[in-house]
Amino acid sequence: MITRHELIRRYTDSCSGDPMFLEPYWMRHAEASAVVFSGWHRMSYRATNGLFQSVELERSIQRLHRAVGNAVPDGKHMVFGTGSVQLISALVYALSPDSNSGSSASVVATAPYYAAYRTGVVLFDSRENHWEGNTARWANATAGNSTKNEDIIEFVTSPNNPDAKLRKPVVGGASAIVDHAYYWPHFTHIPAPADEDVMLFTVSKLSGHASSRFGWALIKDENVAKRAKDYINQNTMGASRDTQLRMLSIIKTILANLHGKDDIFAFGQDVMTAKWRKLNAVVSRSRRISLQKIPPQYCTYFGKIREPSPAYAWMKCERVEDGDCYDMLLKAKITTRSGTWNDASSRFTRISLLKSQDDFDLLLEKLTELVDAEMDTT
Ligand code: PMP
């Protein structure tokens, strides 16, 4: 039990996207989701079918997409990765021109975007692709030069990290990698199953098992899927077989409870909606800070209009004199992630709502103090 005095001294950690809000759900399903295996089990590089990927896990993931209605797995190749962050690099490689062609793909995204797209491309610094930045800036910069849209790889995050907007590609003719990390009913309404040519998912944001480092891509084109698989095989020889076993148990547990009294999405949506409502109640009293607006929308999974429940709050500091929003909140002992990380203005900052209830309660406490102090001076 922390005392009020200790609470006041502590900084909140509202920075990382660590999905600890789902821990109570798995505590309730501790036995059904547990995986125990002996020392001799699964020692080989490969599964018994000689492959790096478990076919049974592939089938369970396909069943999950069909049951949730958030993506069309039929007619697509599935590629597993060590977290979707590994697949980000694998897909950029798979969609880039051949190393002998002499051309290099421009990789772009629309700000505010998830920074790992930029940092990954810049880190690998490869001959076949390069980071070209924000689509807005890039469109002006390339007007009149000879870059063809088939040499462009566009990252699209839907719902977007950080602002939760559902997005579509904006560069016609480019190869889009559509990252659906948050396209699950605990974070957003699901208007229709996603059916893009290259889609990316991660278990980190589906079930909360960020530690397992597991993601998958759904890819329409056979050659692109083969190149992505080649990358993974060269890089790590597939995703960990231990992890695949754990994922099978987690996804089976989710499937067994869908639409039941302990549905993970109903649980997650309740938690996240309550957080969003409380946060809005505090922030709406302020003229200094504001949040993105998200309307209630019809969700095909729940079969009704539902309230918003985003993974992140995208906060704006309204007063020019407050300057950098991250710094302003840090002075109030609230640790967030500056909008500059997302190639956006420093007047914005991202607040994670994915962490534990304790983290959220502390955040709310600090924000209430900030807003109360503003009220005292007006
Ligand atoms: N894509 C997006 C949009 C994300 O927010 C994250 C994690 N924050 C990832 C991919 C990476 O997820 P992981 O590597 O844990 O699978």
Image: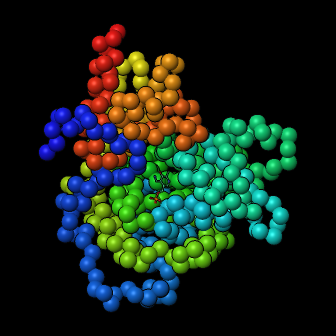
Q: Position of residue 270 (x, y in %)?
A: 27, 44
Q: Position of residue 232 (x, y in %)?
A: 57, 73
Q: Residue at x 81, y 70 (%)?
A: 100
Q: Residue at x 40, y 49 (%)?
A: 17
Quadrant occupied by the C terminus: top left
Q: Position of residue 30 (x, y in %)?
A: 20, 65
Does residue 66 appear anywhere in the picture?
Answer: no
Residue 257, quarter of the rendered image: bottom left
Residue 103, quarter of the rendered image: bottom right
Seen from the viewer's position, the closer of residues 55 and 117 is 117
Q: Is residue 165 left or right of residue 154?
A: left
Does residue 242 appear anywhere in the picture?
Answer: yes
Number of callouts in the render? 0
Quadrant occupied by the N terminus: top left
Seen from the viewer's position, the closer of residues 196 and 355 is 355
Q: Residue at x 28, y 19 (%)?
A: 372
Residue 359, quarter of the rendered image: top left
Query: Eyeballing the image, is 319 above or below 190?
Result: above
Q: How is the image coloured?
A: rainbow
Q: Position of residue 168 (x, y in %)?
A: 58, 45
Query: Eyeballing the image, is 25 above or below 273?
Result: below
Q: Residue at x 31, y 14 (%)?
A: 375
